[in-house]
Image (cartoon, helix red, strand yellow):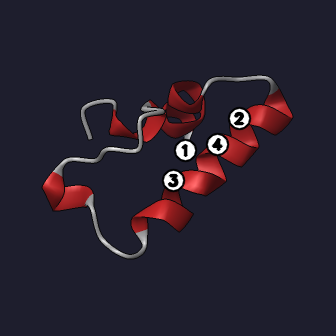
Amino acid sequence: MAGACSRTDGTLPERYDHPGSVARLRVPAEVAAECGATVNQVVRRG
């Protein structure tokens, strides 16, 4: 996703921008906050 999962400006490449994107990106952000990690660290481990 070329770093799109950790972007804070709300933009996604068109091929990843669909109705489920917001929910799918919210979960790694929540896990990162709980663990004291970055979103990139969570996604790479997942």
Q: Earlier in the sequence, mark 3 or mark 1?
A: 3
Q: Residues within 10 Å of mark 3 (few under 14, many from 20)?
A: some
Residues at marks 3 and 4 touching, judged by CB atoms closer than 8 Å: yes
Q: Earlier in the sequence, mark 1 or mark 4?
A: 4
Residues at marks 1 and 2 touching, judged by CB atoms closer than 8 Å: no
Looking at the rendered structure, the secondary structure element under dot 4 is helix
CA gap between label 3 and label 1 equals 13 Å
Name the mark on residue 46.
1
Q: Residues within 10 Å of mark 1 (few under 14, many from 20)?
A: few
Residues at marks 4 and 2 touching, judged by CB atoms closer than 8 Å: yes
Above or below, 33 against 29 in this view is above
Residue labelled with disc 2: 32
Looking at the rendered structure, the secondary structure element under dot 2 is helix
Residue labelled with disc 3: 25
* In-image side of 15 versus 31 (left or right): left
Name the mark on residue 29.
4
For marks 3 and 1, give the one nearer the viewer.
3
The amino acid beneath tag 3 is: Leu
Give the residue drawn at x 55%, y 44%.
Answer: 46
The amino acid beneath tag 4 is: Ala
Q: Residues within 10 Å of mark 2 (few under 14, many from 20)?
A: some
Q: Residues within 10 Å of mark 4 (few under 14, many from 20)?
A: some
Give the residue drawn at x 42%, y 32%.
Answer: 7
